[in-house]
Amino acid sequence: MSESVYGEPKILQLTGSNAETVTIRAKALVFVDPVSQAILHHLEQIAPSEAPVLIIGETGTGKELVARHIHERSGRRGPFVAVNCGAISEQLADSELFGHEIGAFTGASRRREGWFEAANGGTLFLDEIGDLPLALQVKLLRVLQEREVVRLGSRKSIPVDIRLVAATNVDLADAVAAGHFRHDLFYRLNIAQVRLPPLRERPGDILPLAAHFLNVYSQRLKVRKPEFTAATRQALESYGWPGNIREVENVIHFALLVAEKSEIRPENLKLNSIASTSMQATTAARLPPREQIAAATKALLAEPGDNLFNELERIIVDEAFRHSRYNQVRAATTLGISRNVMRTLLKKHGHLSDKSDDGSYENAAAA
């Protein structure tokens, strides 16, 4: 991760292979808005400690970037290891986190260290920790207390020295009340909390983010950097950005592809507004959800573009995966399809990487 400057304020951004991975995570985070500047000051205060950190925020707000910044300011010499808890299969989660010995289970043909050992001396970032099964929450609590892990199939404890940073897009207090999350683990994690607001709550960051991605993609596409018109800047600032930072990146990337001459106009912005006027929004809201979808589909069919089916499929997969809190089985059940079909769709649309050696699938969508 590197830091650059937009005027005086700081920009955190993923670089190298981290930035090239196809994910739904945010790749840049700015601290221009007063709300963001207060967050940055808070991060600088808590980073040097050894206390666990709990980051709360919507998908695409930059939780992993915050975690990486905490690691880099912590002074720890070990690696930064990011794991998405919602992408780990429940059958292999124990092995993924704590490792296993040969013969520990069917298919365990080689010894493997878990993520805790991989992060030894550094920082372990557990994204979407609310998706961690209750049985593993017990083991995680023990590891945090004892600072040692026991691989699956072994009785030997292995000391580990890690700084834990966890993130979630759900209210863990509600999860505790519902019996889905252990209260003792919640209190153990919630020592230093960072709330990362959605982009709509820090509007001062919108134009600097847009300018940052404009620079990035102008260089990547090897085109002369256009300027935003006044109307474009107003459109960017007035939009709600439900997809947060990731959506800003996609919108600017697309605008560069279709913009003509030396400026980006409002019509070049592919903003996913449900309706263009308040009257249209009110009318649509009165329709049942399926009729709203049907009406929106008719509008899309009028100007289908080059790959409409793939775009609609991606929207369904993205929303089902997000609704199920990034759990493959729950997403498949919600859509009424098999887990194998769901897994294929998740891989197709960039949520899962290729199959690993032990048969598990690793998520490509870190915070």
Image: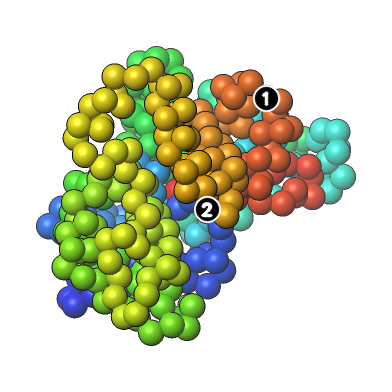
Q: Position of residue 162 (x, y in %)?
A: 49, 52
Find residue 106 and report its image quarter.
top right
Please, what is the three-letter code of the amino acid marked with disc 1?
A: Ile
Q: Position of residue 48 (x, y in %)?
A: 31, 60
Q: Residue at x 45, y 21 (%)?
A: 290
Instruction: Say the numbered circle drawn on residue 270.
Output: none
Q: Residue at x 43, y 63 (%)?
A: 254
Q: Residue at x 51, y 28 (%)?
A: 324
Choose between 233 and 106: the one closer to the eye. Answer: 233
Q: Position of residue 3 (x, y in %)?
A: 34, 73
* Residue 228, above or below 40: below
Label 2 sits on residue: 305
Please, what is the three-letter code of the amino acid marked with disc 2?
A: Gly
Comes first in the chain, label 2 or label 1:
2
Choose between 120 and 280: the one closer to the eye. Answer: 280
Q: Position of residue 50 (x, y in %)?
A: 36, 52
- Quadrant of the frame with the N terminus: bottom left
Label 1 sits on residue: 337
